Image (cartoon, grey):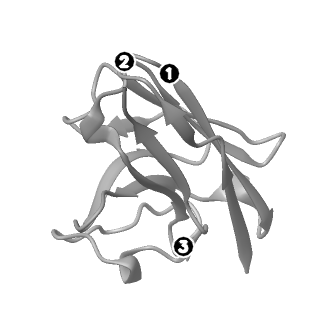
Amino acid sequence: QVQLVESGGGLVQPGGSLRLSCAAFGDPFKDYWMYWVRQAPEKGLEWVADINPDGSVTDIADSVKGRFTVSRDNTKNTLYLQMNDLKTEDTALYYCARAFLRNVPAGLRSPLRKSDLASWGQGTPVTVSS
């Protein structure tokens, strides 16, 4: 069992930056693939980024590539999402989530569903507006 707690969201102007954090409590954080997923108002879930257990492999959605970076600190049981050059279309509720099995990436469907990932945080809102 794991509890995930996101933080760092807020209101930012276009072109600004935010760093989201996700603290994990419970199961060994270092053994799992971790994910960032967002949900914009009136829209479905969108995969944003993922990272393997030791942080050596990352993948970023094309919609945010070059602007967002995912990382993790296994000594602090924390996942991060650095978001730069934010755009209005990045406005969403941002979730961190975990794969089901140790050292095995999740199989994400299209469209993404909450049942594709084992554990979810409560989300942190990001609003990009002038």
Marks 1 and 2, the one that precedes in the sequence: 1
Q: Nearer the viewer, residue 4 or 40?
A: 40
Q: Which residue in the structure is indicated by mark 3? A: 101
Please name the amino acid that badge 3 sits on: Leu
Q: Are marks 1 and 2 in contact (CB under 8 Å)?
A: yes
Horizontal and vertical percent position of residue 120: 56, 71
- Compared with residue 4, is residue 59 higher up or lower down, i.e. above or below? above
Q: Nearer the viewer, residue 99 or 88?
A: 88
Q: Residues within 10 Å of mark 1 (few under 14, many from 20)?
A: some
Q: Nearer the viewer, residue 122 or 100?
A: 122
| For residue 91, side relative to residue 21 (left or right) | left
Residue at image position (77%, 70%) is 27
Q: Nearer the viewer, mark 2 or mark 3?
A: 2
Residue at image position (37%, 16%) is 15
Please name the amino acid that badge 2 sits on: Asp
Q: Secondary structure at mark 1?
A: loop
| For residue 84, side relative to residue 33 (left or right) | left
Residue at image position (73%, 81%) is 1
How far is mark 1 from mark 3, CA to CA?
Answer: 32 Å
- Compared with residue 29, is residue 114 higher up or lower down, i.e. above or below? below
Horizontal and vertical percent position of residue 32: 60, 59
- Compared with residue 87, is residue 90 higher up or lower down, i.e. above or below? below
Q: Quadrant of the C terminus?
A: top left
Please name the amino acid that badge 1 sits on: Ser
Q: Which residue in the structure is indicated by mark 1? A: 17
Is residue 51 visible from the viewing direction of this image? no
Marks 2 and 3, the one that precedes in the sequence: 2
Q: Which residue in the structure is indicated by mark 2? A: 85
